[in-house]
């Protein structure tokens, strides 16, 4: 299994950053649930993104994501790829504006 960031070794974040992560995480979860019933939205994709965001701040969400990653190795591989892509995009954005 790959190494995603866990809540045990998470970096210190400001209150605003934590609230933003939790807000976006829950927003993606709600979109994912809607996407399960609406043909326009990709429900599973939004649920995965929301789970990844929430697992950055919540030990319970981290345990659920770890269990899902063990049960579905393809999901683990996809999540690691998405995390690497996201890190490179954030790094490029920081290079331009930071």
Image (tube, grey):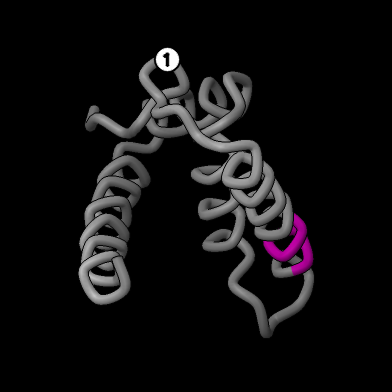
Report the quarter where the N terminus lies: top left
Residue 49 place in picture, x, y as percent: 52, 54
Residue 69 place in picture, x, y as percent: 39, 33
Q: Is residue 81 left or right of residue 43?
A: left
Which residue appears at 39% of the width and 29% of the height? 11
Report the quarter where the C terminus lies: bottom left
Which residue appears at 59% of the width and 61% of the height? 46
Q: Residues within 10 Å of mark 1 (few under 14, many from 20)?
A: few
Residue span colored magenta: 30-34
Q: Is residue 31 magenta?
A: yes
Q: Is residue 45 left or right of residue 76?
A: right
- Outermost bottom residue: 40
Front residue (pair 26, 19): 19
- Name which quarter of the figure residue 10 lies in: top left
Which residue appears at 31% of the width and 60% of the height? 86
Residue carrying label 1: 8
Q: Is residue 76 magenta?
A: no
11 over 89 or under it: above or below = above
């Amino acid at each position: 299994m790959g190494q995603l960031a866990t809540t045990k070794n998470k970096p210190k974040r400001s209150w605003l950053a934590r609230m933003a992560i939790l807000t976006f995480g829950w927003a993606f979860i709600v979109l994912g649930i809607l996407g399960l019933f609406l043909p326009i939205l990709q429900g599973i994709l939004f649920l995965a993104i929301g789970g990844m965001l929430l697992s950055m701040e919540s030990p319970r969400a981290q345990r659920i994501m770890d269990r899902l990653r063990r049960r579905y190795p393809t999901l683990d591989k996809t999540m690691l790829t998405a995390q690497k892509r996201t890190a490179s995009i954030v790094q490029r954005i920081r290079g331009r504006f930071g």
